[in-house]
Image (spheres, rainbow, N blue to C red):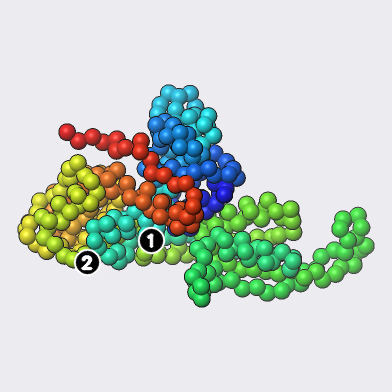
Amino acid sequence: MLIAEVIKAIESIAPPHLQAGWDNTGLQTGDRSATCTGVLLAVDVNTDVIAEAARRGCNLIVSHHPLIFKGLKSLTGDNPVQRAVAAAIRADIAVYSSHTSLDSAEGGISYTMASMLGATPVEALDPADEKQERVSVTVPPDMADHVRMLIFDLGTQPEPGSDAVLSRYDISASTLHTALPEGDGFGDIPECITINRPMTRIEAVMSRQNRRRLTDLLADSPDGHRISIEATALAPAAHARQGLGVYALMNEPMTMRAFLDHVKATFGCGCIRHSALPDPDATVRRIACCGGSGGEFIPAAIGFGAQVYVSADIRYHDFGTYADDIVVVDAGHYETENCAKDIFYHVLTKKFPNFAVYYSETDKNPVKYL
């Protein structure tokens, strides 16, 4: 199995086009065409995690946080990131990171947080706006099936009997006849002599990211010179179940005080910070969650009618500003995103049941509690 196949499995549930513009989801180091010997799962990547991967015989690390977040201007080992990148390269270990693409995926970080708390996710707090394009690929008829398969492979495959792919891509084909010169070279063309050469046009609606990937794949084809691609931007479409944060309904309501204890136990928090409890015995039925730094979505959680918002990296003033409208809980950045490893594990072991996938034992929360 190739590293590329592992990446494809991750991207089937967390496609890269869902990432924020400032993010760096994707392959950080390594060769996607190499054979994968094992996968180590982590939230963060450092030299200890890379050494652990080497000991376990894993040449791929799948992490939540990108190893390379800001651009590297040198590779001299002057800081932890540079040292980790250099260690990965020396050990020939690939690092793939799925960050805000996993945060924004349906079934991603925030959805998993809600499920862990015993709640049923309803929709995203900040729905993703996918930049969609209508793409027309014109090819000789003998290449049409190949191009159709590439288009299908870029999207989520439907369940048997489902028409999800057809509806998502709006695939249609029509035969065109283009007047082309007779002969293979300009020197062979008799004046004013042309023939009709049949061509097939395949149309699909896809994300801009996938159009770029399709273009790269076709450009690498030996017959790439026989293909033409046109793309027209469409108005961004908001997807209520994709995006950052999630609004959810508790399956079994509990008191506010019990809920806070539940948050602490569920995420293994050394401690939690929270705003004042107007009524510790109030029944919690509606919650909102966002893994990692989610303070900016507090107003959205209030707009959904959530009674409690669970996230991390909450600013001091936010605890007081929104105290009359919602109980804000800061459960820790690492604690709320540690479930990324569980998501990766379930995706990969379901897709590759007999393949070596490990949780990192050296990946630790960098924040300590006294």
Q: CA distance from mark 1 to mark 2?
A: 19 Å
Residue at left offset 35%, top offset 36%: 362
SS class, disc 2: strand
Q: Residue at x 40, y 29 (%)?
A: 80
Report the residue marked by disc 1.
106
Q: Residue at x 50, y 63 (%)?
A: 156
Give the image location of residue 265, x and y in percent: 19, 49
Query: Residue 323, position in %: x, y?
Result: 13, 53
Residue 201 in percent (x, y) is at 67, 69
Give 105 or 49, whichever is nearer the viewer: 49
Residue at mark 2:
251
User: What residue is drawn where x is 48% and y is 57%?
Assistant: 351
The mark closer to the camera, 1 or 2, is 2
Residue extending farthest front: 354
Q: Quadrant of the C terminus?
A: top left
Res 299 seen here: no
Label 1: element kind: loop
